[in-house]
Image (cartoon, grey):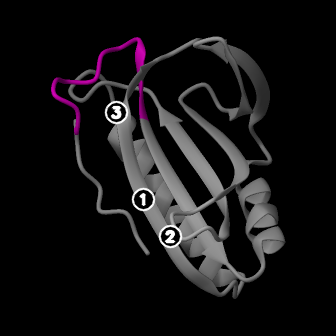
Amino acid sequence: MRWRQRNDWGPRALAGDEWAVLEAQIDADDLDAVENAVEELTGFMDSFREDVDGRPLVGVTDGQLSVTQHYTENRRGRRVLQVIFYATGPVGVGQPHAFDRLGSAATSLVDHLQADGIALSEIRWTEHPYQKRPF
């Protein structure tokens, strides 16, 4: 269930104008409870809407970590909640760096879901290529 934190998973180091992108596909019987838990964790963040590659990206951000969520289907065709974390901060430039932020966010999410007693079938973590930050 937990993401095993790594630093700089791309073919090169994360640049200052890029996000490290980590996706969680959460499979649970009560996805509404999962969605509410994510909203509780991100409730202090500011909303944002940006166009990225001609598509709208809508979520919340604290300036260093951004989060989006929406429903999709997993590889077995089951409805899941997809939560995507976007973190900034190259390794060696500042603390915490993007990968520390992702590790903290992923751990907080799993801990919060467990503390709320939400039964999870699976969390599938995917590390995506770095992405140019729109803000």
Q: Quadrant of the C terminus?
A: top right
Residue type (three-letter) at the residue carrying disc 2: Ile
Position in image of residue 123 (x %, y %): 50, 70
CB of mark 2 within 8 Å of CB of mark 1?
Answer: yes
The residue nearer to you, when weighing 71 against 14, is 71
> Which residue is disc 1 drawn over?
125
Horizontal relation, residue 110 to residue 29: left or right: left
Horizontal relation, residue 98 to residue 38: left or right: left
Q: Earlier in the sequence, mark 2 or mark 3?
A: 3
Q: Quadrant of the N terminus?
A: bottom left
Residue type (three-letter) at the residue carrying disc 3: Gln
> Which residue is disc 3 drawn over?
95
Q: Main secondary structure of the magenta part?
A: loop
Disc sitting over residue 123 in the figure:
2
Q: Earlier in the sequence, mark 3 or mark 1?
A: 3
Give me the residue at 34% from left, 33% from top. Answer: 95
Could you tell me how far apart the alpha carbons at marks 3 and 1 are, in whole angstroms?
24 Å
